[in-house]
Amino acid sequence: MILERYRPLIVEGLTKAVGLDGPLGLLVRYPLGLSEADGAPGPGIGGKLLRPSLVLFSCEALGGEVREALPLACALELVHNFSLVHDDIQDGDEFRRGKPTVWKVFGVGQAINSGDALLTLALRVALDAELPSASKIMAQETLVSATLRMIEGQVLDLEGEGKVLGVREYLEMARRKTGALLGCALALGAIAAGRPEFQKISQELGEELGLAFQIRDDILGIWGDPERTGKPVGSDLLRKKRSFPVSFALERDPALASLLSAPKGNMEEILERLRKLGAKEAAEKEVEKHLSAAEMIARELPWPAWARTEFQELLTFLAKREA
């Protein structure tokens, strides 16, 4: 599958990209899993590496050389990790991928430096791409624009805390916060392959994948198996996170807002109200809707048979993933 096909190459590229010396080196390697807090070797790069994998997949599927797209793939993953480090500060999250978050280990000030350095490294790494000047500039503009759009999504997410966020507003936020980087991934692959005429449609495809990915995350954040997700049932409710199921439910039962404001003592009632309103089923249908849209868009791309097969496997994985 796509997530396995490119992983060794991405790990190699990321390891090289964060080879800085001194305290700053530790601050950029720790969130990637390459270092422990004391500087000892870490467990290794975790996560699905979905975004960089899509960059390389898009490039190869459009006839490009994968290694020419690798700097862009690594740059995008560094942007993603920058966003996670800063998100953890903003949300007060103490753990990510089973280990204490950067701010919890090094303090808020150094965590901000960590995120800033990851973003700056991303821009520097993107410059290493051995592409024609016009393509390199196009790739940089695409990466920067997507980063800004992702930050806009985070702004909308934080602004919506404590408010009744409707489904339409939620989708606008998620299309930016999650969709922007996934759209960027496939667009960067098209640019690296020398097929800029497919940049726009590739971006649209990635944004649909992003919405499906985020809403599936929302389902797991409420009803996921704790042994698979590493989080208790209703974890997103405890964090008062505005998700698709919550937005769907609030549009149909605004009185639910008072329970959601104090979830610790009302978890059973909240879950029962969500069940009666069909919030989980609605979210699952929304995932299917965006995956179907992605499948339709993908038909317009001139991918070879192997790429279509692997993309179909990815769609199945995104629809059913449990972590």
Image (tube, helix red, strand yellow):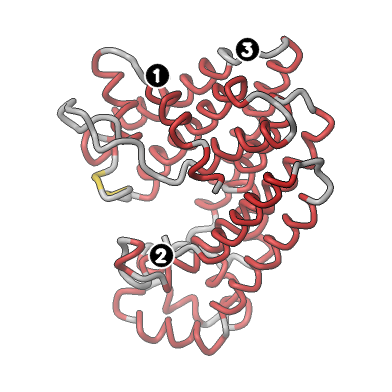
Answer with mark 2 or mark 1, whichever residue precedes in sequence: 1
Q: Amino acid at mark 1?
A: Lys
Q: Which mark is residue 130?
A: 3
Q: Which residue lies at the image location 52% right of the left edge and 44% below the top edge? A: 50
Q: Position of residue 9 (x, y in %)?
A: 47, 29
Q: Which mark is residue 288?
A: none
Q: Which mark is residue 236?
A: 2
Q: Is residue 46 left or right of residue 130?
A: left
Of circles 3 and 2, which is in front?
Answer: 3
Residue, far top: 133
SS at badge 2: helix
Q: Amino acid at mark 3?
A: Glu
Answer with mark 3 or mark 2, whichever residue precedes in sequence: 3
Q: Quadrant of residue 192?
A: top right
The relative height of residue 246 versus residue 115 in the rendered view (above or below) is: below
Q: What distance separates the C-alpha of mark 2 from that of mark 1?
A: 35 Å
Q: Amino acid at mark 2?
A: Asp
Q: Position of residue 132 (x, y in %)?
A: 72, 11
| Circle 1 crowding by C-alpha within 10 Å: few under 14, some 14–19, many from 20 | few
